[in-house]
Image (cartoon, rainbow, N blue to C red):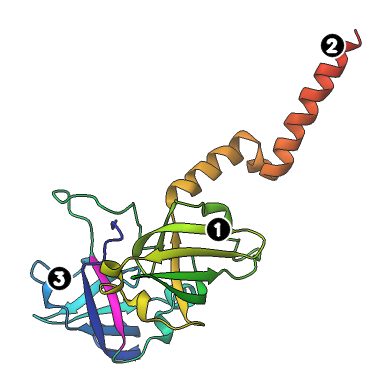
Amino acid sequence: MFTGLVEHLGTISAIVPLDTTESGGGGWSITIGDAAPILGDCHIGDSISVNGACLTVTEFDATSFKVGVAPETLDRTDLGERKVGDQVNLERALAAHVRFGGHFVQGHIDDTVTILSRVIDGNSLRLLFQARESTPARPSLLPYLIPKGYVALDGASLTLTSVSDVDRTFGVMLIAHTQSRITLSEKPVGSKVNVEVDMVGKYVEKAVAAAFGSSSGISVGDGLKGIIEKAVEKEFQKRNM
């Protein structure tokens, strides 16, 4: 579990698509350097959020650490497109004794979105993103996004300033302090950004879906329609008795 408050910017020092070393596990591995500030209490097996993705430390020294990246993670995130020299947002797993300043972030990326525009607003930066079209395999993120709600972008907890279901877009504003501490402020238009929606919205949706009977194959919308139709029919019967 994470808070979405990025602790440090690390730099990718190595990418191995087929890492056959013991710490590589025969899969895709990434080594991240310039990471000394977050490695003082590191252990093998620890979780570190890398651009919002919760990854496991398989090897580390005083200034760098290695993580393995599973095919599912490569498919869901931008990590497969990162290059040596790229900076990434880093956050250690939440400790019980620290202040909780962001929101509950799992480090489980839901999908990527594309930066649609960048607009300077005083000393702030407004960013607009577009989500991909919904498919059965990749349902829309929009139902979980509300103005002034939370979203994690590349692992950074941010507040939504706008949401358009019609255009499949949403926006955030980065204050000057945030711009200097996360990679998002440097990404150009057209770049992919990792998104994790607020998990509270997912639990609410599941609870509502269960109440409307969607577990039996009925959608939330159809379930609500059925409830309204029954109420109208009952009222009609009462009036005509």
Q: In this image, 179 relative to 37: left or right?
A: right
Q: Secondary structure at mark 3?
A: helix
Pick whichever, 143 or 107, lies toward us.
143
Rendering coords of residue 131 (x, y %)? 57, 68
Residue at label 1?
163
Instruction: Tell me, for residue 38, which label it has, or none.
Output: 3
Residue drawn at x 51%, y 76% as measured from the top left: 117
Count numbered badges in the picture.
Answer: 3
Distance from the alpha carbon under mark 1 to that under mark 2: 42 Å
In the depicted structure, whether residue 2 falls above or below residue 214: below
**Which portion, as a residue range, is magenta?**
86-91
Q: Quadrant of the N terminus?
A: bottom left
**Residue 73 on image: x %, y %:** 42, 73
Q: Are marks 1 and 3 in contact (CB under 8 Å)?
A: no
Per the image, label 1 sits on a secondary structure element best described as: strand
Q: Is residue 219 left or right of residue 83?
A: right
Tell me whether circle 2 and circle 3 mark residues in contact (CB < 8 Å): no
Which secondary structure class fits the magenta region best?
Answer: strand
Amino acid carrying label 1: it is: Val
| Measured Cα–Cα span from mark 2 to mark 3 | 68 Å
Which residue sits furthest right?
240
